[in-house]
């Protein structure tokens, strides 16, 4: 299994993935993200998983899958990205260039940022990772935004919208490395596509205060609070020094003997 970068996790079995997809169907989800790929020469042994994917698409769920990171290791056909109805996602770096490991083929539908993506790992804090596994969730998230803005669109119409609004890529309008182009979430949600209705997106509510002014006021309040604590600490230290100044001479005169002795 390729596509999902190694993070120390246990590889998912085909049976487990089929069960997970069917669970998602039972929960009536709108989008399924699959940041993994089974890179086999054929789809043998994947029948149960393939059937589950078909069931998801038939249930009007947008299925998004990574095309894998084995370009330099024989570039095997990735599943489920290569199956009909699945949106196959390649990865590009911050300059819009395909990552060397991102696989190529007719199964690539579009590309998305997948280089040096900030992520969190259990017990390891924040780190950065690269690959199609990180590009795929960005496409899935955009598909979710589209479904929220256009609740009447079918999964096929959502896929077409994502592809129709993709930005041009170095490979041209259709290539094995970039598909139709690079994901553009803003265009996907706002542009008029093939006669589809334009989403009515309400403007943001006006703010009573300037965000910069609010931030400055918060910093000033924090500095004031810190200054008060420092002042209190200074008074405590001054009192301690004054007490020592009084106690030490008296103790010296008594040769440090307790009073009354």
Image (tube, helix red, strand yellow):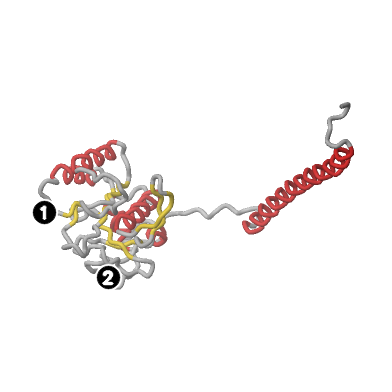
CA gap between label 1 and label 2 equals 28 Å
Which badge, 1 or 2, comes first in the chain's sequence?
A: 1
How many marks the image carries: the answer is: 2
Does 220 sit left or right of 197 as displayed? Answer: right
Q: Is residue 13 above or below residue 114?
A: above
Check the picture and name the quadrant holding the C terminus: top right
For mark 1, what is the residue? 42
* x and y percentages locating residue 60 in the rendered image: 27, 45
Please name the residue shown 23% across and 69% down the image.
175
* x and y percentages locating residue 177 in the rendered image: 24, 67
For mark 2, what is the residue? 173
How many neighbours does mark 2 have within 10 angstroms: few (below 14), some (14-19), or many (20 or more)?
some
Observer-nearest of 158 and 81: 81
Observer-nearest of 73 and 68: 73
Please name the residue shown 26% across and 63% down the image.
102
Does 243 sit left or right of 213 as displayed? Answer: right
How many neighbours does mark 1 have within 10 angstroms: few (below 14), some (14-19), or many (20 or more)?
few
Furthest residue toward top: 260
Q: Quick one: SS at disc 1?
A: loop
Q: Is residue 59 above or below residue 138?
A: above
* x and y percentages locating residue 12 in the rendered image: 23, 44
Please name the residue shown 70% across and 53% down the image.
223
* x and y percentages locating residue 162 in the rendered image: 32, 59
Observer-nearest of 251 and 121: 251
Instruction: Between label 1 and label 2, give the one nearer the viewer.
Output: 1
Q: Quadrant of residue 19?
A: top left
Q: Which mark is residue 112?
A: none
Q: Quick one: SS at disc 2?
A: loop
Q: Quadrant of residue 88?
A: bottom left
User: Do the residues bearing badges 1 and 2 touch, measured as CB atoms within 8 Å?
Assistant: no
């Amino acid at each position: 299994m390729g596509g999902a970068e190694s993070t120390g996790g246990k590889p998912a079995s085909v049976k487990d993935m089929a069960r997970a997809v069917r669970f998602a169907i039972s929960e009536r989800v709108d989008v399924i993200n699959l940041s993994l790929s089974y890179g086999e020469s054929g789809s043998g042994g994947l029948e149960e998983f393939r059937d589950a994917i078909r069931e998801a698409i038939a249930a009007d769920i947008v299925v998004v899958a990574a095309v894998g990171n084995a370009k330099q290791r024989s570039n095997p056909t990735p599943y489920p990205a290569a199956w009909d109805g699945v949106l196959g996602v390649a990865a590009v770096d911050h300059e819009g260039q395909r990552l060397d490991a991102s696989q190529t083929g007719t199964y690539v539908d579009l590309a998305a940022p997948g280089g040096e993506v900030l992520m969190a790992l259990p017990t390891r804090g924040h780190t950065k990772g690269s690959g199609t596994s990180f590009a795929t969730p960005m496409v899935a998230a955009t598909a979710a935004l589209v479904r929220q803005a256009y609740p009447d669109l079918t999964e096929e119409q959502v896929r077409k919208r994502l592809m129709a609004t993709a930005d041009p890529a170095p490979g041209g309008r259709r290539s094995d490395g970039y598909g139709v182009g690079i994901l553009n979430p803003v265009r996907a949600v706002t542009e008029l596509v093939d006669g589809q209705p334009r989403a009515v997106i309400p403007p943001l509510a006006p703010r009573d205060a300037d965000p910069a002014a609010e931030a400055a006021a918060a910093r000033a309040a924090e500095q004031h609070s810190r200054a008060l604590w420092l002042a209190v600490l200074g008074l405590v230290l001054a009192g301690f020094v004054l007490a020592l100044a009084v106690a030490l001479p008296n103790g010296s005169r008594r040769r440090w003997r307790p009073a009354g002795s």
